[in-house]
Amino acid sequence: MFIRVNKDKCTGCETCLSSCPYDAIIVKDGKADITELCQLCRSCLSVCPEGAIFEVEEEADKKEKAQGSGVWVFAEQRDGELAGVSFELLGAGRRLAEKLGGEVSAVLFGGSAAGAEELIRWGADKVYHCDDGIFRAFNDEPYAGLLAELITQYRPEIVLAGATPIGRSFFPRVAARLKTGLTADCTSLDIDGETKNLLQVRPAFGGNIMATILCPHTRPQMATVRPRVMKRGEYDGSRKGEVVKVRADNVKSRTKVIETIREVSEVSVNLQEANIIVSGGRGMGGEKGFQLLFDLAEALGGCVGASRAAVDEGWIPYRHQVGQTGKTVGPKLYIACGISGAVQHLVGMQSSDIIVAINKNPDAPIFSVATYGIVGDLFEILPLLTKRIKEVKGA
């Protein structure tokens, strides 16, 4: 794909010059010309009064766009247990496939036959399953090798994976091998009604804007999606599908995983799986203020989260951080205490079912996403709330 100028139509009016953010248009011999600086932003196409600037689609572009069908979801597992993000991706994949008129397939490396059947019950039409011993522990090289091989063979149109340590580690290798685009840490996915391209939405410029990214000319379209930002599909225990057994005969690895050691923090604080989260921000004032959150979380049977500001102050460890640079969560109940609601934090928790905001500033942005809002002194409200919950539970 490239941009060209019809010299016969161009009058040299220079209207197009200011439209290009990359200074890729020059006037040469009284005619506009597109230089190698062009980034295909297409800003110039609509400004030319003579219609002299046009887009040229190469044969290679047409060929690649026509290749592939269906949506694939990489089903992550650890120690034989399927990760929650796999079910969320199946829900998202089903919605995309319905708009494209295709099917949803899951790819499972390691795990069990029962795990493959479980993926079908959560919405997969087909599961490509390889239980070779090389996949007993996660290793970038064999994962990337086999997935790239399968994509080349079956040619899906869209491939999704979780933006987890595993997905972030090997998925870019797959995209590089296939020479296609990859959008990381997406918070929303959709299909363009006209072009049928995948609309990949993610925070950009420090979370100050939400960018919609396209991969119009190469296939497959690949994206990683943050855990807990997508809703799971519907579970159907009677659902039937096809399990395709995959062999790893051509997959080799120059390294071997000897042992995997879990961090204690993974066990003690699992915000992404919590149903109730009580979070605090700069308004908590310090570590003593956070003790009020721990008391409330204990009474509710939930976990304690925090904004980046509180973590940066050293009031609570990083593993509690919620937001763009922390964990993305989607609990049934999220209580935000003393959090103003910067977009970087909202990205990480706005998919929660119910959001309760407590802040003394009635104009705090957090109230724009809150289901219920309380304007007042949290140092008075939190102890009263904790006491009342304990009384109700005791009754």
Image: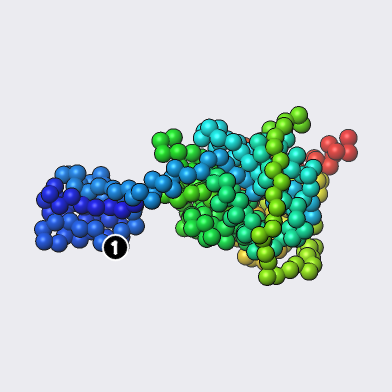
**Element carrying mark 1:** loop
The residue that mark 1 highlights is 36
Note whether 171 is above or below 90 in the view shown. below
Q: Residue furthest front?
A: 249
Q: What residue type is labelled 1?
A: Glu
Q: Position of residue 348 (x, y in %)?
A: 61, 50
User: What residue is rendered at 60% in x and 54% in y?
Assistant: 149
Q: Which of 316 and 390 is in front in this view?
A: 316
Q: How is the image coloured?
A: rainbow
User: What residue is rendered at 71% in x and 46% in y?
Assistant: 245
Residue 8, visible in the rendered structure: yes
Note whether 153 is above or below 286 in the view shown. above
Residue 36 placement, left or right of 298 = left
Which image quarter: residue 291?
bottom right
Q: Position of residue 182 (x, y in %)?
A: 51, 54
User: What residue is rendered at 32% in x and 48% in y?
Assistant: 57
Q: Position of residue 111 (x, y in %)?
A: 77, 50
Q: Nearer the viewer, residue 276 or 10?
A: 10
Q: Where is residue 157 in the image (x, y as percent from the top left)?
A: 52, 44
User: What residue is rendered at 31% in x and 58% in y?
Assistant: 38
